[in-house]
Image (cartoon, coloured by chain):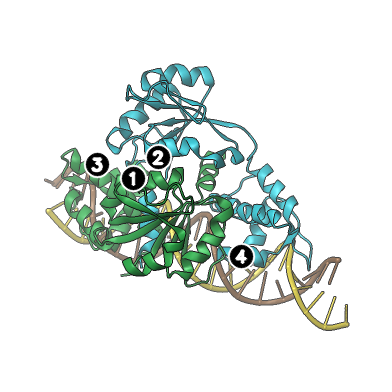
Chain colours: A green, B cyan, C brown, D yellow
Amino acid sequence: MNIPEKTIQRLTLYHCILVDYLEKGKSSISSGEMARLLHIDASQVRKDIKLVKHEGTCRVGYDVLGLKNQIEHCLAFKEPKHAFIIGAGNLGLALAKYSNFGNYGLQIVGLFDTDAIKIDLSVNDKKIYHMAQLPQKTEELGVEIAILTVPRQHAQSAADMLIQSGIKYIWNFTPTILDVPKEIQVRNENLMGNFLQFTYK
Amino acid sequence: MNIPEKTIQRLTLYHCILVDYLEKGKSSISSGEMARLLHIDASQVRKDIKLVKHEGTCRVGYDVLGLKNQIEHCLAFKEPKHAFIIGAGNLGLALAKYSNFGNYGLQIVGLFDTDAIKIDLSVNDKKIYHMAQLPQKTEELGVEIAILTVPRQHAQSAADMLIQSGIKYIWNFTPTILDVPKEIQVRNENLMGNFLQFTYK
DNA sequence: TAGATTGTTAATCGATTAACAATC
DNA sequence: TAGATTGTTAATCGATTAACAATC
């Protein structure tokens, strides 16, 4: 099944609402209710839900637990995804401690840095390795995903090392646009872009 | 001038490239080069640049410094924007220390938490206040932007307090969809949604 | 039944891409 | 000049919204 990117984004937002409703003990929810919370159109919600092959009930809405499970299944939330964090600075360490990743199947299996003081320390039971160990650890643990949080100036050279080590997906939290071969998937988190987009008039 | 949201997002990405080119001492750049780095179409780059009223030169491209300045001017990078961080946990503290915000005019002028141990401490010269002081500090400092990094369960009640205190923009890093009046601007950072979108097949 | 809600098609809207003349 | 690149229009594509029949 081929789900458009925009729809995937919205499905994860519906999922957040469903988790919340489940906690509050609500068993059903209408497309109109989800649409109101997200400030989007109700028919779009219904169309998105159709894409994950979940059916609602006229006059009642959608089953909260059933829809939540179906989204998790379609988006493969539960499938374990191992990742490295590259750069054990403020942001890298915060992400290493961020417990919410686990709910979506994302497991941090190690951090990398070049600062001798940090090497061999552990954060949240995850060890910090030296960058020189990257190729070996990548192969040993079969990791394909890297979360890049190094200082801006080192982003490109770190990315080059990642690619050489066999990393396929780079989640880029730096404000550097990486020059990579087209088979490598890069997602620019671009925090400041998001901020400006939302505060701009 | 009215710039579409998608264009604003791309303009910030062009800006990242320009900063990098400037450091490398390059004085001009073509639309094709920017397009290649971002995996988009070159005519889109040219169209976006037209929107910020910058002109290129045939056979040469765009002036790196001039275009960078023009983007900064149009997107009001330099205008100071004061903000609070709500929740002095891992992510909140990391963002308080994140030096890149300053380059875009975003100044953190205080953090808020409810944990007695943290109150009155300082992070990166920014004081941590108790949530009870929020209404007073918001008015005193004229702050309109809040960065929400509290635990998921407290996101809605924190948002309610923010709105009561006069906050107009909420940059939401929690996985909770906030129920707010429509005049309040919310940007859901939705980290896990971004992650799933990019690793999904 | 009446009313609320889904499912779905058609209409609209906006964003992206293709094409190419103009320029230096 | 020839060639590279911009600026811009037209064509295409995809996403959103409107409308409404079907359902319970």
Distance Cα–Cα, label 2 vs label 3: 21 Å
Tell which of B83 and A80 is nearer to you.
A80
| Other residues around mark 2 within 10 Å, as few (<14) / some (14–19) / many (≥20) | many
What residue is shown with label 4? Answer: B35
Q: Do the residues labelled 4 and 2 touch (CB within 8 Å)?
A: no
> x%, y% of residue A41?
37, 49
Under circle 3, the secondary element is helix
Distance Cα–Cα, label 4 vs label 2: 33 Å
Numbered label tally: 4
Q: Is residue B160 above or below residue A21?
A: above
Please identify the quadrant where the C terminus of chain B is shown.
bottom left
| Residue type (three-letter) at the residue carrying disc 2 | Leu
Under circle 4, the secondary element is helix
| Residue type (three-letter) at the residue carrying disc 4 | Ala
What residue is shown with label 1? Answer: A98
Under circle 1, the secondary element is loop
- Report the side of B66 relative to A111 (left or right): right
